[in-house]
Amino acid sequence: MYRDIATLSTSTVLALCLTLLLGATCAHASDEEPYQNPADRVPPPEEWKVERHNAMKARLLEGNADLVFIGDSITQGWEGQGKEAWDFFYADRNAVNLGISGDRTYHVLWRLEDLDFSNVAPKLAVIMIGTNNRAMHTGEQIAEGVSAIVQTVRGKLPDTKVLLLGIFPREKTPDAEYRVKMAEANANLASLDDGERVFFLDIGEEFLDPEGILPEDIMPDALHPNTKGYWIWARAIEPAVARLLGDMSPGNPPKGYVALFNGEDLTGWKGLLKPPLDNPERRAELTPEELADAQAEADALMREQWRVEDGMLVYTGEGRSLCTAQDYADFEMIVDWKIPPQGDSGIYLRGSPQVQIWDPEQWPEGSGGLFNNEIHPSKPLVCADKPIGQWNTFHIKMVGERVTVYLNNTLVVNKVIMENFWNREIPIFPSGQIELQHHGSDLWFKNIFLREILPGEGWRPLFNGEDLTGWEQVGGTQQVWGVEDGLLYTDGGEGGWLSTIEQFGDFELSLEFRVPEGGNSGVFCRTPREGNPAYAGFEVQILDDYAERYATLEPWQYTGSVYEVAAPARRVTLPAGTWQRMFIRCEGPRVEVTVNGFLVTETDFTEHQDKVDRHPGVARSEGYIGLQNHGSRLDFRNIQIRELNR
C-alpha cells in the first residue's frame, strides 16, 4: 500500500530531503510524489534526460543493435568509469546503452513505451534497475516495477532474450536498510526466470568481500562501480551474455576465456594416474621418467574410455578421471554437464576433490557443494539442478583457497574455503590440474571454457586481438606477421621479429603459444632494436621440445630456458599443436619463467655477468618485448602485461 506524503514520519521526510540533495549516491530525484506506483509510466522531468532519451531513439532508428543495456546511472556509467570494460566486451557486439542516471522503474517504463524498436531486433537485453526506488517502495513493490519492465521488453521485442540482473548491493554492510531491501526485491525477481526467454542472474556477491562488506575500491560511494567494479560486472555476466547471444562455441569462447575442450578430440587432456598417484603429493615424488611411464599408461586407458561424440566429451563409466594437460592456479571455469539417473561425478580443482555432481532425486541438497570439506561448508546454498537428462551449467571461480560456484545461474557456493582432501594439515595446493571425475557413471560434458585469473592488479593487453596496434616488425625482407581469428601469428619466411612499440623494465608477461611440429620461436625481453635480440636483450625459448631434430640440444635450448643463460629445471611442455601457457617475471636481475602452470626457470643475472661480452642483455634493465620469427608458423594469443615498481 502506498502512503500519502502527509503520513510520512519526520525522519522519512528528512531522508527524502537528503535524497534530493546527495547527487553522488542518490537518485537525482525529481518532482513526482514518493508514493508513485512503480509500474506507472512517468516521463523524466529533467531536460537533459529528455535529450539523452531522444538520442537513444535516434540510435535505435539506425538499426544494428544486437545487445541493449537498460537501467539507470549504474548502466549509464558504462560510458564513464565502465568505458574500458565496455570497449573490451561490447564494442564489437553492436551494443547500445539505454541507461539514464536517476531513473526509477516508472521512468524506464515510459522510455520503453516511447522508444521505437522497429528497426532493431536485439538478441539480448540486459536489465538492471530498481535501486532508485528504494526510498519510497518496499522490496516487493520494486520487484513489481521491474517485472513490468521485463514484460514491456518482452512485448515490444518478443524474439529478444532477457538477462535480468539482480539489483546491485548498496551501502557498506550487509545489514544496512537499503541493502536488505534490494535483497528482498531480488528474491522476488528470481521467480521471473522461465529458463526460455527470461534469465535471472544475481551477481551482487561478486562485488562483496567474504564478510559481505562492499569495498570502497570497487564502489567508492557504496553504490556506483568504479573502473574495477565495471570489470567485475562484465566478467561476471560474460558467460551468460555469450551463451544468450547464441554465438558461444569452442571456436568462439566467451570474452577472456579459452576453450579447454575443442569439441573434436582429446587435445589438451590427459588420463588420471592410477592410485596412489592420483594424489598430487605422490605424483610430485616421481622422477621425470617414472612420471612419463605412468602418464603413458593413463593416457592409453583414457583413449579407451573417453571419446568425443557430436561435440561432447562422453565417458563410459569405466576407467579413470579425465584431467587437463596443464595446471592452473586461480581461474574461472564454465562447463556444461549431464548425468543419468543415480549419476555421480564432480569437478576436481587443483587436483583435489571436488565440486559435487549427483542426482538430486537421491541427494536432495543438489550439486555444486564442496563435498569433501569437513570444517567449512560442504553443501550448496540451494538445490539448483535441472531434471536428470537435461544439461546443467557450472560457473566456477577459484581465487586462493576460496571457491564460488553458480549452478544454472544460481549462486550455490559463495567464496567458501576449499580444504585439502589429500593433506588436511595444509591449505589447498596453489595450483594443479582440473579433473572431470570418474565415479562409475556415464557422463557427458561440453562447452568447457577457462579464464585464468592472473596474480595482482594492473594487467593490460599487449595484443588487442584485432590488428598489430602497439607492435611493429623489425628487419626482414617481407611482412610475415599478421592477425586472424583473434590470433597473432607469423608464417615464417624471410621476415623479421615483432617488437612492441613500448619499452619495459620490470614486468610480468603472460601469453599463450601454439608451436607446430618442429617449430621454433621465442620471447625477447629487454632488448634494443639493434643487434640480435636474443643476445642484446635475452630470449625465453619456445620450441617443439619433442621433435626428433631437437633431441640433442643443450638443456638451455628447450622451452622455458633463458637462452644460453639458464636451463629449465623440468620439461612440462605439451605436444606440438596444443595451446600452451607461458608466464615471465622480470624484476631487477631476477627472471622467472613458468610454463603450463609449472615454475621451470629461476635465475639471477648478477650470477651471469661473466657472459656479458657475448650476451650483453644480462646487464640491461629495460628494452622492448618481442616475438621471434624462426622460419616456422607460430600462433600467440592472450598476451597481457603488468608493469612492476611503477
Image: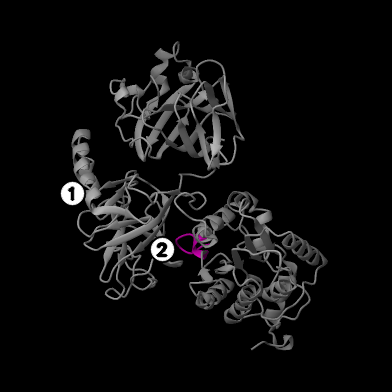
Residue 210: say if magenta. yes
Q: In this figure, what is the number of numbered marks?
A: 2
Secondary structure mostly taken by the magenta-highlighted segment of the chain: loop
User: Which SS class for mark 1?
Assistant: loop
Foreground residue among 42 and 542: 542
> In the image, 234: left or right of 550?
right
Task: Look at the image and give the residue range highlighted in magenta.
Answer: 204-214
Q: Name the kind of residue labelled 2 in the image.
A: Thr
The residue depicted at 44 percent of the width and 36 percent of the height is 513
Taking the spot 28% from the left edge, 20% from the top edge, the residue there is: 552
Please, what is the three-letter code of the amino acid marked with disc 1?
Answer: Lys
On residue 274, the disc is 1
Image quadrant where residue 634 sits: top left
The C terminus, quarter of image? top right
Q: How is the image coloured?
A: one colour
In the image, residue 399 above or below residue 541? below
Kindly identify the residue that appears in the image at 64 percent across and 89 percent down. 1
Q: Residue furthest top?
A: 613
- N-terminal of the pair, mark 1 or mark 2, is 1
Q: Of 139 and 362, which appears nearest the observer? A: 362
Whether residue 217 appears in this view of the structure is no
C-alpha distance separating marks 1 and 2: 29 Å
Instruction: From the viewer's side, name the closer residue of 397 and 23.
Output: 397
Image coordinates for residue 454, horizontal then vertical, percent: 46, 44
Residue under pointer 2: 393
Q: Position of residue 517 (x, y in %)?
A: 36, 31
Residue 591 appears in which quarter of the rendering? Answer: top left
Expressed as whole percent of the image width and height from the top left, the position of residue 132 reads 66, 71
Element type at marker 2?
Answer: strand
Q: How packed is label 2: few (under 14 Cα within 10 Å), some, or many (20 or more)? A: many
- Between 539 and 574, the residue placed more toward the observer is 574
Whether residues under marks 1 and 2 lie with C-beta atoms below 8 angstroms apart, the answer is no
